[in-house]
Image (spheres, helix red, strand yellow):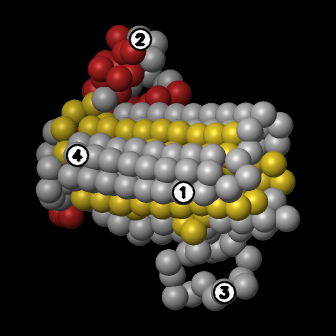
Amino acid sequence: MISPLAHIAPGARIGSGVTIHPFAFIDDNTVIGDNCVIMPYASVMAGTTVGEGSTIYNGAIVGAAPQDFRWKPGQPSHCTIGARCVIRENVIINRGFATPEGTSIGDETFIMATAHIGHDCHLQGRTVVGNGVTMAGNIEIGACTILSSNSVVHEGSRIGEWVLIKGGCRISGNVPPYVIIAHNPASYYGINASIMRKSDFTDERIDDIAKAYRHIYQSGTSVFNALQRIEADIDPSDERDKILSFIRDNKLRIVAVPIDLE
């Protein structure tokens, strides 16, 4: 059902089974996948692709122009929303221009009301973005991560998979996978065990993750030494290797570690 009161630009490509409510705005050079729902007063701007089965709620703006002085009108910019995503009321997602894929939101991501996602952010699938979360540009968020309400993520930060960021927390840096980060300034709060247990992580895998982070955050040694201890103390596994590679890929710089221990 497409309301005659909605604005559908001639260059928009609309899939089958799509519902577009009155007063929605669908710009040129957009793709709306099959079985999507676009609620009243939602806007899908030029350069945006929305995956099948996604719902965009009232007042949301998906694919807004980048908020960056480097971007000039007419310069190519893109925004891709995955399948079965939920984008709630008054969310703003900016297109990206600094990376080839632009801004990308993975499948089955849930973005709650009034959140803002800046240009060239890349969110992997099954991410939850809480009410009022704000993200600057060029941020990487791993799969199955939760950013609780009103948390703030600064430009260029990288957050691993299965992370829980507590409400109101400010992130400026790199958060390794499987942890909980809370407070201001950001502090290590343990591992995200309760969520991982609900997703079929075994107790043995969770114990190894906890042991790895005791070396990193609770042993009083440097990150460099902690990684060596992890390799000597914990059997190889997918989780162990992801922790090691994340920290090394980010040159040992992770949040909540005192500078003199990096």
Q: Is residue 142 visible?
A: no
Q: Which residue is mark 1?
A: 41
In the image, 164 versus 9, the foreground residue is 9
Please state which of the two labelled residues, at mark 3 or mark 1, is closer to the viewer: 1
Separation of disc 3 and disc 1 at Cα? 24 Å
The local secondary structure at tag 4 comes to: loop
Looking at the picture, which amino acid does disc 4 mark?
Gly
Q: Is residue 133 left or right of residue 111?
A: left
Mark drawn on residue 73? 3
Q: Earlier in the sequence, mark 4 or mark 3?
A: 3
Residue placed at 63% from the left, 74% from the top? Answer: 98
Q: Amino acid at mark 2?
A: Thr
Q: Earlier in the sequence, mark 1 or mark 2?
A: 1
- Residue 226, percent across and down? 29, 43
Which residue is at 74% across, 77% downward? Answer: 76
- Disc ID at residue 135: none
Q: Nearer the viewer, residue 214 or 147?
A: 147
**Amino acid type at mark 3:** Pro
